Image: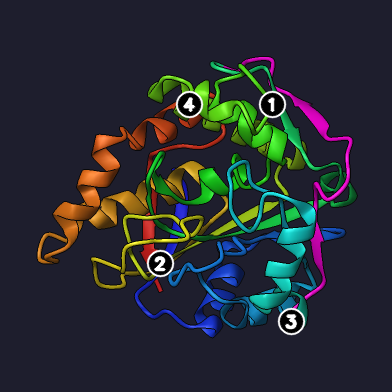
């Protein structure tokens, strides 16, 4: 069974402690995948929160451009927003798809797509720390480690390819070709599997259940949090950590915002991404939760 470590205390220091509990020393040059936050979004986790863990492992913060209109869909705009949000003041930041060509990662056993397009700069790293703000998502139902691996690591063209279930890499056409919901979720799982295959055992995942809104950090206009903060989770298994987060949401029966959050997850069939990822063999929904 996978091991997931959990703490109700949400501090930068506790992030570092849970990382140590996972017991995996990441080798070589380390990519630290974060969400840079859309312009106007009030819920994303700021660089100051992540600073101790990034400095602890001497990592490079990485991001990729988006596939929708906003302040992050071109390299020029995204770099300006990264500066505005303070990321480049705190860290070395690598926009992995700032310049093409993208790298195509093969997915021979993919259910919806057979390759995943990522920024070519991913090839400069030997390991990855995936830092996720766990929350809802307008399209995927929820966002956690698997979304960071898939949509998060995909280039702008790669994001379009995932959203369209392999129909197009053109961000100007993707929203007219968005895949059927389950195919989209399966494409996310496929893409996530290609990143885990690339890095092998050299990945650690940290999910922070804070600012629990039904909307993603990619939303310029997002709902305020509807649930109380729950805690931090860490694991070397992306399937287990996302499943554990959802289980903690289901267990929060005394929280008045729980039903609203779960409506977002369930109406989009969000757990299907976890199920599809498990079928691909990149993790297990069977886990033990150890509270720290």
Q: Residue, x 59% and y 41% (percent of image)?
A: 151
Q: Mark 2 points at which residue?
A: 6
Q: What element carries label 1?
A: loop
Q: Tell me how far mark 2 sits from mark 4, CA to CA.
A: 30 Å
Q: Give how far across and how far down residue 106 sits, in percent.
A: 75, 22
Dot 3 corresponds to which residue? 90
Observer-side mark, 1 or 4, equals: 1
Residue 19, compared with residue 187, is above or below; it is below
Secondary element under disc 4, as helix, strand or loop, is helix
Q: Distance between the residues labelled 1 and 2?
A: 38 Å
Q: Name the residue under label 1.
A: 169
Q: What element carries label 3?
A: helix
Q: Give neighbour class at mark 2: few <14, some 14-19, many 20+ (Cα, 10 Å).
A: many
Q: Mark 4 points at which residue?
A: 184
What is the C-alpha distance between the residues marked 1 and 4? 14 Å
Residue plotted at (61% across, 71% down) = 20
Residue 93 in the magenta stretch? The answer is yes
Res 263 → quadrant: top left
Q: Earlier in the sequence, mark 1 or mark 4?
A: 1
| Secondary structure state at the residue bearing disc 2 | strand
């Amino acid at each position: 069974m996978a091991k997931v470590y959990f703490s109700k205390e949400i501090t930068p220091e506790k992030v570092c402690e849970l990382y140590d509990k996972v017991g995996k020393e990441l080798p070589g040059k380390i990519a630290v995948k974060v969400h840079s936050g859309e312009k106007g979004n009030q819920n994303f986790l700021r660089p100051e929160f992540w600073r101790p863990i990034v400095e602890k492992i001497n990592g490079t913060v990485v991001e990729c451009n988006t596939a929708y209109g906003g302040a992050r869909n071109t390299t020029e705009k995204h770099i300006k927003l990264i500066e505005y949000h303070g990321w480049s003041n705190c860290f070395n930041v690598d926009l992995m798809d700032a310049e093409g060509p993208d790298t195509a990662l093969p997915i021979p056993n993919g259910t919806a797509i057979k390759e995943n397009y990522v920024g070519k700069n991913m090839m400069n790293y030997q390991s990855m720390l995936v830092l996720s703000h766990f929350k809802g998502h307008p399209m995927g139902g929820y966002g956690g480690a698997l979304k960071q691996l898939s949509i998060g690591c995909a280039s702008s063209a790669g994001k379009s390819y995932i959203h369209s279930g392999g129909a197009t890499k053109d961000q100007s056409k993707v929203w007219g070709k968005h895949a059927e919901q389950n195919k989209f979720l399966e494409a996310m799982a496929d893409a996530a599997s290609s990143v885990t295959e690339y890095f092998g055992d050299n990945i650690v995942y940290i999910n922070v259940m804070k600012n629990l809104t039904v909307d993603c950090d990619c939303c310029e206009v997002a709902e305020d949090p509807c649930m109380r903060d729950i805690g931090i989770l860490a694991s070397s298994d992306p399937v287990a950590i996302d499943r554990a987060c959802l289980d903690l949401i289901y267990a929060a029966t005394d929280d008045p915002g729980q039903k609203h959050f779960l409506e977002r997850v369930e109406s989009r069939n969000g757990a299907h991404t976890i199920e599809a990822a498990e079928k691909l063999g990149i993790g297990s929904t069977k886990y033990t939760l150890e509270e720290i």
